[in-house]
Image (spheres, helix red, strand yellow):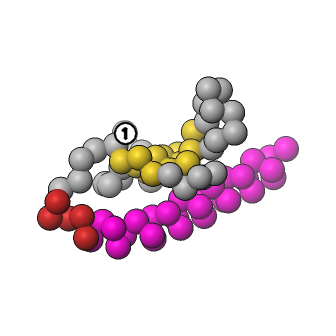
């Protein structure tokens, strides 16, 4: 099965939050409201520097993904 790079998620227990889940390594969930990030796996210490540098780009891509999806939802209505 091919999976997308990002997916949107919400939860009725957190009605004011919207999450983007990154499904490629490093897998993480970002709360778009607070920009809190939770990694879904332990990161290899030898890769931490590279991943920290990559995270800024991935966070930007997550925001772009969210904007694109919201625009598409609005166009469908």
Spot the residue most to the left. Answer: 46
Q: Along the horizontal axis of the image, is 53 left or right of 57?
A: left
The segment highlighted magenta reads: 50-77
The answer to whether one can see residue 9 in this image is yes
Q: Quadrant of residue 47?
A: bottom left
Q: Magenta region, mostly helix, strand or loop?
A: helix
Can you say whether 21 is above or below 15 in the image? below
Residue drawn at x 59%, y 52% is: 34
**On the image, numbered disc 1 is attached to which residue?**
1
Residue at the (81%, 52%) spot, across then down: 75
Left or right, residue 8 beside residue 24: right
Q: Nearer the viewer, residue 51 or 4?
A: 51
Q: Could you say where residue 5 lies in the image, as x and y percent from the top left?
A: 44, 53
Residue 23 seen in the current view: no
Residue 41: x and y in percent read 28, 44
Q: Quadrant of the N terminus?
A: top left
């Amino acid at each position: 099965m091919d999976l997308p790079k990002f997916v949107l998620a919400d939860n009725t227990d957190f009605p004011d939050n919207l999450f983007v889940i990154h499904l490629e390594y490093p897998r993480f969930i970002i709360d778009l409201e607070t920009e809190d990030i939770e990694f879904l796996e332990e990161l290899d210490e030898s890769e931490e520097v590279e991943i920290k540098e990559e995270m800024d780009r991935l966070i930007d891509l997550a925001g772009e993904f969210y904007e694109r999806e919201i625009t598409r939802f609005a166009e469908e209505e």
